[in-house]
Image: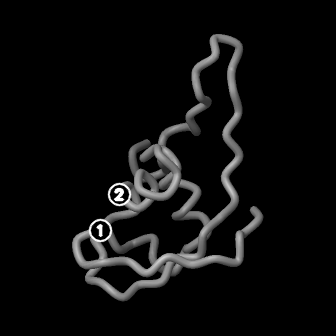
Amino acid sequence: MNLTGQVYLCSAGETFDSVALTLYGEEAYAADLLNANPSLCRKPVFTGGEVLALPIVEIVENTSGNTYMPAKAPWKE
């Protein structure tokens, strides 16, 4: 996994899903954020002040023209 070298400072009440939606436009990229930040993976809701390392996310187009969505997030399996 490649990281951008950028970080995101979380606010109280945010989650991996909400950060993924804000930064990448899709909640499905929360799994990528989790993989890039394993020390925070057991924290369902941020208290504020957590710093997330941001991964580079590749958006792949499928043949139907819809944006590819990663497989289910690990915690939803």
The residue pinned by badge 2 equals 18
Spatial CA span between label 1 and label 2: 6 Å
State the image quarter where residue 14 is shown: bottom left
Residue occupying image coordinates x 56% and y 37%: 71
- Residue 77 versus residue 61: which sits nearer the camera? 61
What percent of the width, then of the height, locates residue 38?
55, 74
Point out residue 4 in the picture as x, y percentages from the top left corner: 71, 70
Q: Is residue 16 above or below residue 73?
A: below
Q: Up-down: is 26 above or below 19?
A: above
Relative image position of residue 55 (x, y in whole percent): 65, 64
Classify 10 Å Cα crowding around label 1: few (below 14), some (14-19), many (20 and above).
some
Residue drawn at x 57%, y 78% is 7
Residue name at image x 61 percent, y 30 percent: 68
Which quarter of the rendering shows the C terminus? top left
Q: Residues within 10 Å of mark 2 (few under 14, many from 20)?
A: some
Q: Which residue is mark 1?
A: 14
Image check: 62 left or right of 32? right
Which mark is drawn over residue 34?
A: none
Which residue appears farthest toward the left when viewing the image?
Answer: 13
